[in-house]
Image (cartoon, grey):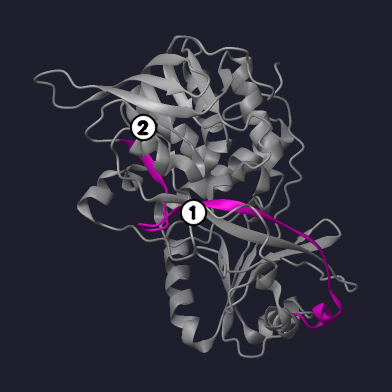
Amino acid sequence: MRSASPSDRAAPRSVDILIAGAGVMGAATAYWLSRHDPALSILLVERDPAFTHASSSLSASSIRQQFTTPVNIALSAFGIAFLREASSGSGHSNWSGPAIELGLTEPGYLYLATPEQEAGLRAAHEIQRANNAAVALLSRAALNERFPWLSTDGLALGSLGLSGEGWFDGPALHRALLGRARAEGTTLAAAEVTGIELDQRPGADSARVATVRLSNGEHVQCGQFVNAAGPWSGAIAAMAGIDLPVVASRRTVFVLSCPSPLAGCPLLIDPSGFWLRPEGRYLITGCPPLDVSDNLPLDPDWRELDHAAWERLARRIPSLEAMRVERAWAGYYEMNRFDHNAIIGPHPAISNFWMICGFSGHGMQHAPGAGLALSEWMLEGAPRTIDVRALGYTRLERGERLPELNVIG
């Protein structure tokens, strides 16, 4: 098997499918396309082939079933099944390679709600149960019994994922998907897409992507074009005259040490806005950003863990009064400003322009299912395994939002 990096030396002049972006979405799409049809010529174009600044490398890499949009719950259900199969190496219905060391652990997500938030949490619970997610509502007494290190002051109840929720090694998943795609013949070019040339033939109902210009001076003709550029998907779409409201939205993650262990700690989402989970012998945490400007540099915003934020953490988990901040890093959400949901599928006016972007913080967990759905849509005319058509671009043109209410941070 070829390694996930460095890239191949030169891009071919013509390919069946060109994918802009070799992060986890581009890699997953290439993986499934090559599995479905090994004869396809596929080119991944990646501006950062070492993935130093890629969202795939900087993600907190967690997975949950507790969404409020049914299609997201379906993508998560597929995602956890894929991760379990890839971790064990048993069966080859979804994962075609050897077992991956993913460090998958499933202690659940715990959403906490104040009395004012209780109705919303119960409504989300009904959606999740109706879509076969294993979740349970816990009273304050049940929370105290199950998590004695947790202060329930000011809470009404919590929602705990009982199965299929936790965290894993996202970069390892990305490397494996990319490696398998390359083993099947996918080419990886270290370059940036700098231009898209369309072909609009007289009398045709739609245009087509004809040629893609790269930063290394090469021009590549392609039969199909996939926009999997993550936070930069909006800029790629603009090259084809498409308005795509996907931007780079910075999030800071802080690494904490705590002298007292938090037995059975799930991924905790507090009503005040912070989230927290174990990471080895440490904890990691984050909160909604103070600066919501787009395309900020990838520098941690240390102001977000100021004295007030520290107090909020310590009020909820008293042992965190003695915590120490070890380090921090920042990564990008590929934020869809329209409705905080992914955009998957074709563009209605450019027949061979496909999109898989805008996941707004839940892309890593949905990459296996989203890549599969898009590959089926491209090769078979419709997504068969997971019906993601509700996430299509046409909802943006119609102005019909499909809001995801459970966006963390």
Looking at the image, the residue that sits furthest to the left is 203
Left or right relative to 148: residue 357: left
What distance separates the C-alpha of mark 1 from that of mark 2?
Answer: 18 Å
Looking at the image, do the residues carrying marks 1 and 2 touch, with CB atoms under 8 Å apart?
Answer: no
Left or right relative to 341: residue 348: left
Which kind of residue does numbered mark 2 sit on? Answer: Trp
Q: Is residue 266 above or below residue 317?
A: above
Q: Is residue 338 magenta?
A: yes
Q: Is residue 120 above or below residue 132?
A: below
Instruction: Depth check: give the residue in front, 400 or 209.
Output: 209
Instruction: Depth check: give the residue in front, 286 or 40.
Output: 286
SS under mark 1: loop
The quadrant in which the C terminus is found is bottom right
Give percent across and percent down for residue 120: 44, 76
Identify the residue shown where x is 42% and y is 21%.
213
Residues shaded magenta: 317-346
The crowding category of the residue bearing disc 2, from other C-alpha atoms within 10 Å (few below 14, some 14 to 19, many at least 20), is many
Q: Is residue 76 above or below residue 291?
A: above
Q: Is residue 4 magenta?
A: no
- The numbered mark at residue 360 is 1
The quadrant in which the N terminus is found is top right
Give percent across and percent down for residue 96: 63, 24
Instruction: Name the N-terminal-most of marks 1 and 2.
Output: 2
Give percent across and percent down for residue 276: 69, 67
